[in-house]
Amino acid sequence: MQNKFTYCCLLLALLTISATFAQKRGPEAYLITTANDTIKGTLKKQLEKERLRSIRFKPVSESNFTSYSPSQIKVYGVGDSIQFVAREVMADGQQQTVFLKLLVKGHTNLYHAEDLSSAGDYYVQRQGEKVVQLQKRHNLTELNYLLSDCPEVQQSTTKSRYSAKYLTSTIHAYNSCRHPDGISEVLLKPSKTSYLVGVRLGSHFGNIGYKGNDIFGEKNLHEKVAEAPSMMGGIFLNVSDERSNLMLQAELLFRNYNIRQITRQPRYTRTFEFKTNAIQVPLLLQFKLPASQKVQPYLGAGLSLGYLFKPTINHDISYEEFVRRSSRQDVEKTERGTIGFVAGGGVFYKLTNRNRLLLELRYSQESALTEYSPIGKERRTVYFSDIQLTTGITL
């Protein structure tokens, strides 16, 4: 069990380090100037809003990054299938020239721009015409009107909002319908996997309980002992796809247990004490709930492995009868490895394309075997059940 735990920690550390370095590398890119000159180089990572109106680009022959606006270049791209074009659009009542991401290239183009307008993120442009924004409040009515000259593509659907996958397939089909001899190229990647690394900090509280014979051989004695609130924190790696409602999250958490309970009776006093530090490694499957532009709520559940450092439970009982006093101390040895589950929910608040605040509430239960021998050896199962409230941020 200890070796398996070590391997899990090493694997999680390697994944976290690899994802961190991958995020810092600048993607290979190119741009096309207004004079139709193509320049290759490196695109600097920027906030989504910043890239709408200006990009930072370093040509291969230069050592410094230079800012380029939509008035200086016509197109810039990343790799073979990601392309942004300079277009003049009407957004939130203002005429402005920005970089739009090209999703479908043909007689009718489909664009996407995140955080440009609260009315909608998708734009359509027919050849020789102005760019038209597909507004959220119109649902699919506006799109159906634009496609009315091709009835076999025009959709009468109950969809409540636009999606990249639906719009891409629809505009591509429209181009093939209206201009079968023309070229319609889909530039939308079939899958966009996102890797987010973050840190989290919070508190946990609950109880420790047993399944088996009761302590000191008396029924209902110390079956559950309350746990005082303690600190916890760690790192996590979240993997998601923008076209899927599922996310996978691996975590490495450090926790502290400080449990002490004293029970006083007329003839005796009992003391239960458990103090240790622990590492918890949950692997969670999370489900995205309906979200707004900035807020993404979710539910999650999964398996959890743990490791306890010096896990010893101390039992002490002191008797007082007339003038005689006596006491007995017993040590319950606990295995270091634990296994259990976690379940709960939370919310991501989007600050930038990569940085998000996190608030989460979850329930966790882990168990371990113990060996207790006040009279003879006895194997029991101890349960650590607690509520965890944490906050965090992705880096």
Image (cartoon, rainbow, N blue to C red):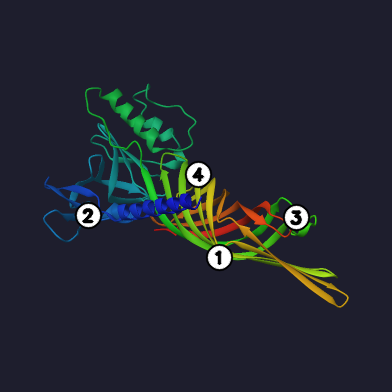
Secondary structure at badge 3 equals loop
Comes first in the chain, label 3 or label 2: 2
Give the quarter of the image for residue 47: bottom left
| 4 or 2: tag closer to the N-terminus | 2
Q: Residue at x 29, y 28 (%)?
A: 175
User: Left or right: 382 with respect to 283?
Assistant: right
Q: Which amino acid, by three-letter code, is at mark 3?
A: Asp
Mark 1 vs 3: CB contact within 8 A: no
Which of the two discs, 1 and 3, sits closer to the camera? 3
CB contact under 8 Å: marks 3 and 4: no
- Asked if residue 116 lies left or right of residue 220, the reply is left
Residue that carries the numbered disc 3 in the rendered image: 214
In terms of secondary structure, where does tag 1 sit?
A: strand
Res 353 seen here: no
Pointer 2: residues within 10 angstroms few (<14), some, or many (20+)?
A: some
In percent of width and height, residue 288 lies at 50, 44
Asked whether 114 or 188 is in front, the reply is 188
Label 2 belongs to which residue? 69
Residue that numbered label 4 is attached to: 285
Q: Secondary structure at mark 2?
A: loop
Which numbered disc flags the more N-terminal residue, 1 or 2? 2
Give the mark nearest the N terminus, 1 or 4.
1
From mark 1 to mark 4, how far is it between C-alphas?
A: 24 Å
Residue at mark 1: 231
